[in-house]
Amino acid sequence: MAYEYALVHAKFTIPFALLLTLIAYPILTRIHLVQISCLIFVAFSATLPWDAYLIASNVWTYPHDAILGPRLLGIPLEELFFFVIQTYITSLVYILCNKPLLHSLYLVSQKSPKRWIRMGKLAGQILLASITLLGAHLVQRGGPGTYLGLILAWAPPFALLTWTVAGRFILSLPWFATALPILLPTVYLWLVDELALGRGTWSIESGTKLGLRLFGALEIEEAAFFLATNTLIVFGMATFDQYLAVIYSFPHIFPEVPRTPTPLMLVESRLLGSSAYDFDRLDGLRDAVKVLQQKSRSFYLASSLFSGRLRINLTLLYSFCRIADDLADSTPTKSDVLAWTAKLTHLLDLFYHGLPSVCLLDAPPPARPSPPLGPLRLLIKGFETDAQFAPQGSDNIKQKQQQQQQQFPIATEQDLLDYAECVAGTVGELCVALIVHHCDPHMSAARRQHLCAAACRMGIALQYVNVARDIVVDAAIGRVYLPTAWLAEEGGMTPADVIARPEGPAIDRLRRRLLDRAFEMYDEARPSMEGIPGEGRGPMVAAVETYMEIGRVLREGGERVVRREGKNRDRATVPGGRRVWTAVRGLYGQ
Ligand SMILES: CC(C)=CCC/C(C)=C/CC/C(C)=C/CC/C(C)=C/[C@@H]1[C@@H](COP(=O)(O)OP(=O)(O)O)[C@]1(C)CC/C=C(\C)CC/C=C(\C)CCC=C(C)C
């Protein structure tokens, strides 16, 4: 039947490619499409002459009734399509397997590569060169080894090239980032090939093959072909990613990175020696990723959905916020917290106003007034509110009452709103500022202002969820973020009562009241997220939704959910599968 080969695509390769596209499309960026297109072009160019030779030499033959008819250099249309769709499938599998990774962290293998990486790269080069020579020998000898020789003399030189360029980077990546995207498509295509060979869709002329089969009707040469070609594709993608990682990681070399780095930038990145890399920055980035991973499963999962320098900058922003917040939380006295916030403000002065660089955390903050409060300063101001919870001893009754008021600074809902705006509304604004900078730097001021206002609102919503979740945890460290006025409405409760017993029906009612306010603000701000530009929207929606899911879990389970044992004792958490599912739905804009 003339459609036999075409049916192989219709039944096996195209559906698989469509499934992978459906799964990958929310995380695919323009640079991914450039990578895949470049690889398809290289694969097509490299395979065309080789394939044409095999067909001309009658290594491969196709029953006339199995193909549609059109050919290029004797190669059937369906075979030409195979070059494209195999490259596409394997590239998508590679992209999906590598999405969790921040490739910048694997550049460190260029600095002083571990001995096994150095030896591994050399061993790989020797192995690939040897296989090439073996292939040449088999071709030269002719006979049954011809087809295998043609594979081994053709593919390994290309692999040797990419391995020489990116071998250390490839070896430093986890196995699921390289071996898995090679093996998964390879095994799938072995099965497809076995079916096709078994049905006679194509055949390998006897006299040019060894007659060995991996399983079923799958000739060893066909198995080697798919393993070799998928290895080439993965090595090609990894080489691309190594140089993209250089571009994204070093603003001192590439100050501005467009949404799609230019070929010139890739060449510059390739020509750059690793001596120009800022390895201290890579170490700092590694620490920031550790902080993110340890401190927030919601944002850690969401961060992996971003790409490029935006992902790096959001990770660094999270790390700054988190460390600043932890400093405010873990410092015993109010004066110490204020000292830390002054130093952080000084740090911002140094970064954003180019003040003389001194050792940041030792020098006393300058006497000069800080620049106008931007989101970062408001964030730090918010931490100063946390400092007021630190108890201050006093014997004087009046002073004690005053201290009491001071010690619980969230007297009204407005106080809570102001505090949440400082510590979280600002974070929303900062996130949007980063996304606009990277994804739509020419956005109109009006649209930017609208997004920032909505982002601030959403940040407050998340903070309210945070407060509702952490009533028990906060009480344990002497903090009550529930407005004192709300407490008074609950039978004259006081913050001291909450600290003494942060549970019970009254607390549940207050938690629900707080969550209701949180979801009101979420509902107000959520529609504006559709206006987040480009590749930032899906991941940011995923980040917000996974966090708000904590609030949904609390609403469903209330006190029962909060009282938990184990690592997250007294804090409601979203079960892992539900968190991932929420992120995926957010990514797809559900
Ligand atoms: C994907 C990614 C890495 C995003 C980074 C977002 C970011 C920079 C978060 C920093 C959070 C942080 C540590 C701030 C310090 C103060 C604080 C603790 C705020 C509370 C966050 C909880 O953080 P975390 O999960 O680490 O702590 P717990 O596990 O809960 O203890 C807050 C709840 C505030 C978080 C607020 C935001 C992330 C802003 C949300 C708003 C947007 C993303 C903008 C949405 C856009 C529009 C247009 C509506």
Image (cartoon, rainbow, N blue to C red):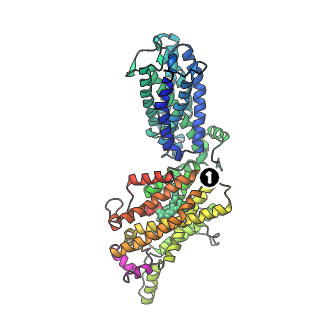
Which residues make up the magenta segment?
481-503
**The quarter of the displayed image where residue 263 is located:** top right
**Number of numbered discs visible in the structure rendering:** 1
- Rendering coords of residue 21 (x, y %): 51, 41
Horizontal and vertical percent for residue 450? 62, 64
Note whether 110 is above or below 133 in the view shown: below
Q: Nearer the viewer, residue 426 or 77?
A: 77
Examine the rendered structure and indicate whether residue 434 appears above or below residue 129: below
Across and down, in percent, residue 311 comes to: 55, 51
In this view, 262 is above or below 313: above
Q: Which residue is rendered at x = 39% and y = 22% of the image?
A: 214
Residue in the image at 52% along x and 36% along y? 91
Confirm or reject: label 1 Cβ below 8 Å from ligand 1: no
Kind of residue indicated by mark 1: Cys
What kind of element bears circle 1? helix
Disc 1 crowd, CA 10 A, few/some/many (<14, 14-19, 20+): some
Q: Is residue 257 magenta?
A: no
Position above or below: 32 against 47: below
Q: Which residue is more in the foreground, 21 or 255?
A: 21
The residue under label 1 is 439
